Amino acid sequence: MSDERLNDEENMGTAVDGGEDRIGALPGDLLRYLMSFLPSRDAVRTCVLAKRWHTLWKSVPALRVYDPESYDCAHGSSSFVDELIRLRSPTPLNVCDISSDVDDDANYDFDRADEAFRRMEPWIQYAVSCQVRVL
């Protein structure tokens, strides 16, 4: 094994043993960029990792909503997205990716689809107001 690789493995072991947070040491802009690839629900969950992460999710430049139950008003996911938008910092969005499984159903329900799209409309308006680049 090369000396360089041994040093990396030793440093990794030291970081784990010593409790050093190597990811948390990255610049905030890089962390937000990396978090922008996560579904929004997971990006918010990072707030429990460390004090520094507590508000990073608020300025992630992406809104990604993938869970199908998000569009059923009886479930908590749509209120999660409403709260996410309410609490998010007013920073520009690079990406807004909202997926729906409404049209995947063999027994297409137009009323359900109409309700789902009505529910998404304020989310899309929010994305446009944040100067979203990719919708």
Image (cartoon, rainbow, N blue to C red):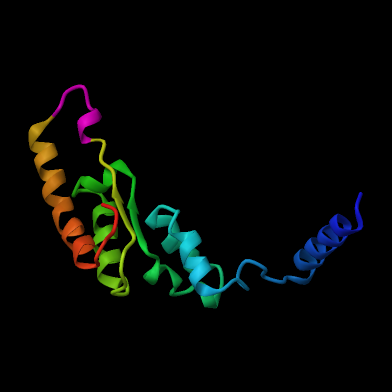
Q: Quadrant of residue 104?
A: top left
**Residue located farthest toward the front when viewing the structure as drawn:** 133
**Residue located farthest toward the top when viewing the structure as drawn:** 106
The front one of 113 and 6 is 6
Q: Is residue 57 left or right of residue 48?
A: left
- Residues drawn in magenta: 102-108
Residue 75 pos. (x, y %) = 25, 49
Residue 59 pos. (x, y %) = 38, 71
Residue 100 versus residue 26 in the image, above or below: above
Give yes or no for residue 76 being in the magenta stretch. no
Q: Residue at x 24, y 67 (%)?
A: 130
Residue 29 versus residue 95 in the image, above or below: below
Q: Residue at x 52, y 67 (%)?
A: 30
Q: Is residue 7 left or right of residue 21?
A: right
Q: Quadrant of residue 90?
A: bottom left
Residue 28 pos. (x, y %) = 51, 73
Q: Residue at x 63, y 73 (%)?
A: 25
Q: Quadrant of residue 87?
A: bottom left
Give yes or no for residue 107 being in the magenta stretch. yes
Q: Is residue 123 left or right of residue 34?
A: left
Q: Is residue 111 left or right of residue 47?
A: left
Label tally: 0
Residue 26 pos. (x, y %) = 60, 71
The front one of 5 and 48 is 5
